[in-house]
Amino acid sequence: GELSRGYRRTAPVITGQVVVIIDEDTPREIVLADLIVTDADSTFPDDFTLMVQDGVNYTHAGNTITPALNFNGPLSVNVQVHDGGYTSNTYNLGITVTAVEDVPPVVSDIPDQTIVKGGAFTAITLDDYVADPQDDDSAIVWTATGNVELTVTITDRVVTVSAPDMEWTGTETVTFRATNTNDLFAEDAVVFTVNDESQDEPTDDGGGGGGGSCFISTTGFDLFR
């Protein structure tokens, strides 16, 4: 608005920026110090506010941007500043997004289990057996394959395994696969055994499941160990 006769405030102008480099898939808050601003009647950055606008290949929560999943290369983020009276031009803030090698999760050995006919297998908390450098445990998707007669259920990353009936005996191998948000995975095979009640009652075998059967999927090749 008009401050005095013959004088009007002017809008700020974003004229440049500092170098901004971030890693792939990494959030970054955009701040006033990232910008070079000229304003004839205001001192930058005093009393200025910054606004990140919607754009391509990123999302934002307030002024914190996150590149699109697996995006790397030049990224242009639309920003404006406000000096308390006027809003600046929209400026395309250039960000270099550095590629980061995607790696699969690491699944540790899930113990085999052996019970007596009519007994119950111990529930398995899968979060205890996975690590991923980029994803939280809650982001890992688990699946199970290989069971024929045993029922395997995964709910909130907790496994329950049950026999078809109280008289069933036998052995089945179930392979658990952990897949991260980059669609890379690792597996571990677990042996579930139900013995006849006439045998000596065994205990859960902590020497477990993966010995020689862990499988890791990587971008370029597969590793067996």
Image (spheres, helix red, strand yellow):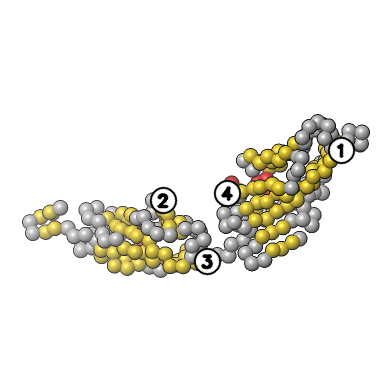
Q: Which residue is mark 4?
A: 139
In this view, the mark in front (2 or 4): 4
Q: Which residue is mark 2?
A: 61
Q: Amino acid at mark 2?
A: Ala
Q: Which residue is mark 3?
A: 99
Residue at 89 percent of width and 33 percent of height: 197
Decide which of tag 4 and tag 3 comes sooner along the chain: 3
- Res 87 → quadrant: bottom left
Look at the picture and state if 218 lies above or below 201. Answer: below
Find residue 118 and report its horizontal and vertical position in percent.
82, 31
Say which element carries label 2. Answer: strand
Q: Nearer the viewer, residue 19 or 91?
A: 91
Decide which of tag 1 and tag 3 comes sooner along the chain: 3
Decide which of tag 1 and tag 2 comes sooner along the chain: 2
Q: In 3D space, how far apart are the residues under numbered discs 3 and 2 (Cα atoms)?
A: 22 Å
Decide which of tag 2 and tag 4 comes sooner along the chain: 2
Residue at 46 percent of width and 67 percent of height: 73
Say which element carries label 3. Answer: loop
Say which element carries label 4. Answer: helix
